[in-house]
C-alpha cells in the first residue's frame, strides 16, 4: 500500500529578516540542537497552505500568510513517501511576539547573509539560494 505524507516548512519573513528556530534533534550527535525554519506535517485533508500557517502559529504564536512555494523536496521513510513544500510566509507581527512551543529551544531573526551561520543543511541552503532569498 502506498502511503504519502505532506511536510510543510514555513520560512517566516518580517521586513528584511527571517525567523529561525532551534530544535532538538538527537542526543547521539555532537550538536543535538540545530537551527531550522518552522516545520511540521499537514493533517489529513488539510491544504498545505493552511497547514504551514497552522504549524507556524502553534510553534511560534505568529500569525502569517502563506506566500509562494520556495522549493520542494521528497524523502522516503520506510514505505512512506514524504513530499515537502517550503513556503515563504509573511507576518506583520513584531519580533517580540514570538512565543515558542515546548518543542523549540530558541528563536532568532536573521538576515539572508546569516543563513550560512545558522543553517547547517547544505541542500536547504542551495534551495534557498535558487529561490533567490540570498
Image (spheres, rainbow, N blue to C red):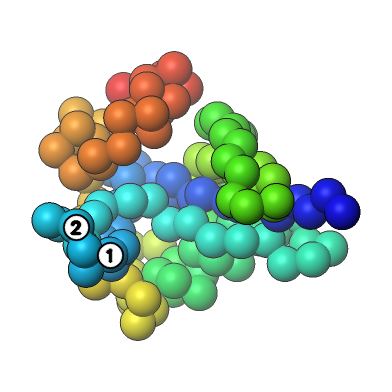
Of all residues, the one furthest to the right in this rendering is 1
Please name the residue shown 61% across and 37% down the image. Answer: 74
Residue, disc 1:
26
Please name the residue shown 14% across and 38% down the image. Answer: 117
Look at the image and tell me whether residue 134 can be seen: yes
Give the x, y percent position of residue 116: 19, 32
Residue neighbourhood size for the residue with mark 2, other residues' Cα within 10 Å, grouped as few (<14), some (14–19), many (≥20): few
Give the x, y percent position of residue 34: 24, 55
In-image side of 100 versus 51 (left or right): left
Residue, disc 2:
29
Image quadrant where residue 27 sits: bottom left
Please name the residue shown 32% across and 45% down the image. Answer: 18
The relative height of residue 129 versus residue 15 in the rendered view (above or below) is: above
Give the x, y percent position of residue 103: 36, 76
Secondary element at image label 1: loop
Of all residues, the one furthest to the bottom in this rendering is 102
Q: Report the quarter where the C terminus lies.
A: top left
The relative height of residue 3 versus residue 17 in the rendered view (above or below) is: below
Find out whether the residues at labels 2 and 1 contact each other: C-beta distance under 8 Å.
Answer: yes
Secondary element at image label 2: loop
Q: Which mark is residue 9?
A: none
Q: Report the quarter where the N terminus lies.
A: bottom right
Give the x, y percent position of residue 63: 51, 65
In front here: 30 or 15? 30
The relative height of residue 92 versus residue 100 in the rendered view (above or below) is: above
Amino acid at each position: 500500500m502506498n502511503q504519502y505524507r505532506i511536510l510543510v516548512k514555513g520560512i517566516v519573513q518580517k521586513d528584511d529578516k527571517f525567523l529561525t528556530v532551534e530544535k532538538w534533534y538527537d542526543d547521539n550527535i555532537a550538536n543535538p540542537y540545530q537551527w531550522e525554519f518552522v516545520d511540521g506535517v499537514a493533517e489529513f485533508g488539510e491544504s498545505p497552505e493552511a497547514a504551514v500557517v497552522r504549524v507556524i502559529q502553534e510553534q511560534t504564536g505568529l500569525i502569517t500568510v502563506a506566500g509562494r512555494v520556495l522549493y520542494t523536496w521528497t524523502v522516503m521513510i520506510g514505505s512512506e513517501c514524504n513530499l515537502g513544500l517550503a513556503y515563504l510566509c509573511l507576518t506583520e507581527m513584531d519580533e517580540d511576539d514570538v512565543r515558542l512551543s515546548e518543542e523549540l529551544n530558541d528563536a532568532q531573526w536573521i538576515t539572508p547573509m546569516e543563513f550560512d551561520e545558522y543553517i547547517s543543511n547544505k541542500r536547504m541552503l542551495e534551495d534557498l539560494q535558487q529561490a533567490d532569498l540570498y
